[in-house]
Amino acid sequence: MYCKNCGEQMNDNQAICLKCGVKTGQGNAFCSNCGQPVAPEAEVCLSCGVAIKKAGNYGNYDKIVIALVCFFLGGLGIHNFMLGETKKGIVRLVLTVLCMGIGGIIALVDFIKILMDKYEVNPDKAF
Ligand SMILES: [Zn+2]
Ligand SMILES: [Zn+2]
């Protein structure tokens, strides 16, 4: 793992970069997977092909679309499926069906994060 702010190599369990003092996952100047510089708006690292995680980035969908889907169908994990978070979506679906809507409560948290641009998309690598 590399610091996304300065590109320094880091331990996987390090919470803060010892070189620049920025929290792990903060910054958008370097790829956390290979440590190569990336463009601030890049969605994929051109050096290693890994998707660059960025809160508030929903790929092909508008924020408002994801927010609405999350609000009405979030308990079924539909917004997770749309964003490629298949495993997360299945967990939501099972939780909602088995536990009388617990997934819906989690989805409400997602909804608030989406509105505040704090939601970070973590698509499954290969499913
Ligand atoms: Zn750093
Ligand atoms: Zn990379």
Image (spheres, rainbow, N blue to C red):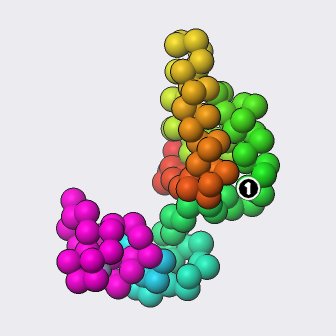
Q: Residue at x 72, y 31 (%)?
A: 73
Specify whether residue 31 is in view.
no
Q: Is residue 57 above or below residue 92?
A: below
Q: Is residue 112 magenta?
A: no
The secondary structure making up most of the magenta span is loop
Residue 77, position as x, y percentages in the image: 63, 33
Residue at image position (56%, 38%) is 109
Q: Nearer the viewer, residue 114 or 89?
A: 114
- The span shown in magenta is 1-27
In the figure, residue 23 lies in which quadrant? bottom left
Can see residue 106?
yes
Task: Give how far across and how far down residue 7 sits, in percent.
Answer: 34, 83
Q: Quadrant of residue 108?
A: top right
- Amino acid carrying label 1: it is Lys
Q: Is residue 93 left or right of residue 8?
A: right
Q: Which residue lies under the disc numbered 1? A: 63
Query: Percent from the top left, x then y, of residue 42?
Result: 59, 78
